[in-house]
Amino acid sequence: PVLDGEPRYENIPINFKSENGRFDDADVRMTLYQSVFSGAFGYTYGCNEVWQMYAPGREPMIEAQRPWYESLDLPGAGDLIHFRRLVESVDFFGGAPMQRLIVSPEQTDADCAVAYAGEGYAFYYMPYGHAVTIAFPDWAQTKTVRLEWLNPRDGELTFYKEIEGGETFEAVPPTQGKGNDWVLIAR
């Protein structure tokens, strides 16, 4: 089993240099969904200020910006609850990574859509909200499938449409670009 134990820490400088920018909540969500939907059995959240317990009077490491106790409520930390609610809503451990359900397009590492499915459900994660052509798992081939969008930033579910499960389908998320990630849920 694989555990993603050192993913992108929220608010840490990219490549440890602030001129490269800092990892934010979108980066945290991307590593979470891509890791677990690809087969990791777990994920640990990290934050630059929290790991070092940075507080006034202490020397900051890796350009810490605020005290650890103010960093506990950064957006990425809160976004993990939406993931947990999603996986607890199904028999997640009875499922498996299903990358074959992503038909197209070819994607970069950062914008790599991933799919995970089990009996009666499929999840498709789109890190930048770009359209992808998807297929459905075997359980959906002879039925009408209900599709919903999960906004991983706030946990809101929105009905998308119903479609016959034997078809491939171009899923077009509501918004696109970095920080506009979406999960398509098929049931």
Image: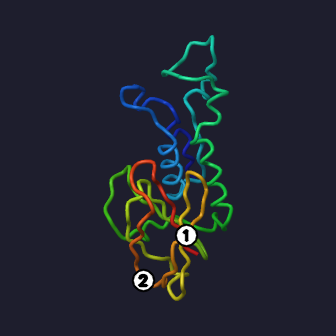
> Looking at the picture, does residue 83 appear above or below residue 71?
below
Q: Nearer the viewer, residue 181 or 137?
A: 181
Amino acid on which disc 2 is placed: Glu
Badge 2 crowding class, 10 Å Cα cut-off, few under 14, some 14 to 19, many 20 or more, is few
x and y percent of residue 15 in the render?
40, 30
Q: Nearer the viewer, residue 66 or 136?
A: 66
The residue tagged with tag 2: helix, strand or loop?
loop
> Looking at the picture, does residue 180 appear above or below residue 137?
above
Residue furthest to the bottom in view is 142
Residue at screen point 45% across, 62% down: 174
Q: Is residue 26 left or right of residue 54?
A: left
The mark found on residue 178 in the picture is: none
The residue tagged with tag 1: helix, strand or loop?
strand
Q: How many numbered discs? A: 2
x and y percent of residue 110 in the render?
38, 49
Q: Which residue is mark 1?
A: 148
Mark 1 vs 2, N-terminal side: 1
Residue at screen point 45% across, 85% down: 166
Residue at screen point 63% across, 44% down: 78
Q: Which residue is mark 2?
A: 167
x and y percent of residue 186 in the render?
54, 73
